[in-house]
Image (cartoon, grey):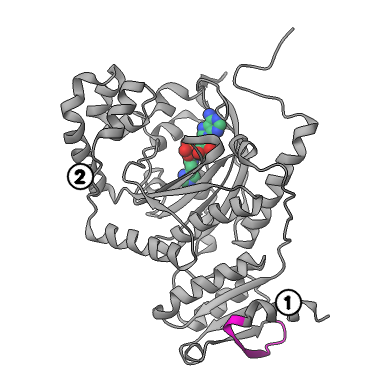
Amino acid sequence: MINALRGTKDILPDEISLWQRIEAIGRDIFNIYGYKEIRTPIIEEASLFIRSIGDATDIVQKEMYVFSDRGNRIIALRPEATASIARAYIENSLFQAGGIAKLFYIGPMFRSERPQQGRQRQFYQIGVEAIGSDNPFIDAEVIALSARFLERLGVKKFHVKLNSLGCQKDKIRVMEKHKESFRPYLEKLCETCKNRFDKNVLRIFDCKEDSCKSIAQNVEAESALCSDCAGHFEKVKVGLNAIGIEYTVDNKIVRGLDYYTRTVFEITQESLGAKDAICAGGRYNNLVKELGGKDTPAIGFAFGMERLTLALDKAREVKIVRCKVNTFVAVTGDALYNEAFKLLDSLRMAGISSEIDYDTKSLKAQMRKAEKLGAKFVVILGEEEFKNKKVVIRDMENSSQKEVVLEDIIKEYSLILSTP
Ligand code: HAM
């Protein structure tokens, strides 16, 4: 009798409808936020992950499935998808389309971890990557998307934890501070962590040994951001506050992969306990460049599908709000950007697929972009109209436009959409 390998599972017909529902809601909400699907190979050159994730990480040191193929190439089963997508972005010149490449993926990943509830050796991730902008509002968008996805699924009692690791220089400073905090406990750390202390002190926070975990819990984690990175982090929070996404700032969120810079976040959920994240992500502004591409900032997240199925309130019937229409939110001037971001969020919450320009160019350039995206409507936030709490809806098909009260915009949409 041959059984499934330890840490792998068959997903049987009885369970599959739950998986399909999660995937369908994921595809729908990603579409509303403008993310398109990408599928990359399950096998890659092992060096892709060693360079991206970092050779001092648990994933690379202990968990990656690596083998040499018949041509003696060193191959890895992907332990995650971000590095593969950064590679695909460069290799297929996805930057040529201009703007931000917004991508999502669903698929199996492989890590040789000790199996337990919600932790497997073959597990599935559903995630997004937004490549090509350092605008803090895109951080807010990505984090909001993860929270809205959970809301749509009917997952309750989740908690978003947020931090900023800063730029490369800040990270070095942060690591020095952490080294000073861990130094008094150096002798009490496990052998691996003693090594991590010199090689990459942040990795001590990932240690699964009880003694190291309790030391890590007790050390002070001071933030050491330069003014640029501190300003960026403040704006991420402003964006999240504007659309009512709840979070707490936790300086100990350092993430288990080395490519992160600036914003990092994790989501925990009550039924999984505080230690296992249901979702995790962050910025990786240097990765594309390190893999041979141009200097390209990026951010993304991944959910563990098995953990999502565990967290899902199975009794609740989840309705899929079908994506309705393409709208572009255009804004005149930086001062109204926050309002435009709020409007964008409410349109998306109503199931209306909507986009904004994160480069905040001229109105003319935004209209061109709307056309390029095939938007059916453009909602324009102009300074004059906004003083009277009004916006303009422009129908791109017949070039007509009308002024509507901002508060009534969703109602207005229902009207437009119900008119044959
Ligand atoms: P990660 O924290 O390594 O990040 O994994 C993301 C999520 O995948 C975890 O929060 C968890 O839900 C799930 N997961 C990880 N390992 C396992 C496992 N052995 N069994 C079951 N579920 C697991 C990443 O992978 C990054 N690529 C996320 C990202 C995307 N960052 C930027 N873009």
Residue at 39% across, 60% down: 134
**What amino acid type should be assigned to the residue bearing mark 1?**
Ser
* Residue situated in front as seen by the camera: 364 or 107: 107
Of callouts 1 and 2, the N-terminal one = 2
Gap in angstroms between the C-alphas marked 1 and 2:
52 Å
**What amino acid type should be assigned to the residue bearing mark 2?**
Arg
Question: Quick check: is the Cβ at mark 2 less than 8 Å away from ligand 1?
Answer: no
Question: Quick check: is the Cβ at mark 1 less than 8 Å away from ligand 1?
Answer: no
The x and y percentages for residue 179 are 20, 34
The x and y percentages for residue 38 are 61, 48
The crowding category of the residue bearing disc 2, from other C-alpha atoms within 10 Å (few below 14, some 14 to 19, many at least 20), is: some
Residue at 44% across, 73% down: 338
Residue at 52% across, 19% down: 68
Numbered range of the magenta stretch: 397-407
The x and y percentages for residue 398 are 72, 86
354 shown above or below 221: below
Would you name the residue on which mark 2 appears?
A: 173
* Residue situated in front as seen by the camera: 44 or 30: 30
Would you name the residue on which mark 1 appears?
A: 414
Residue 188 in the figure: left or right of residue 283 = left
41 shown above or below 163: above
Q: Using the rendered image of the protein, determine whether residue 335 is visible from the camera's viewpoint.
A: yes
Indicate the quadrant containing the N terminus: top left, top right, bottom left or bottom right.
Answer: top right
The crowding category of the residue bearing disc 1, from other C-alpha atoms within 10 Å (few below 14, some 14 to 19, many at least 20), is: few
The x and y percentages for residue 335 are 39, 80
Q: Nearer the viewer, mark 1 or mark 2?
A: 1
Helix or strand or loop: what does disc 1 sit on? helix
Residue 355 on the magenta span: no
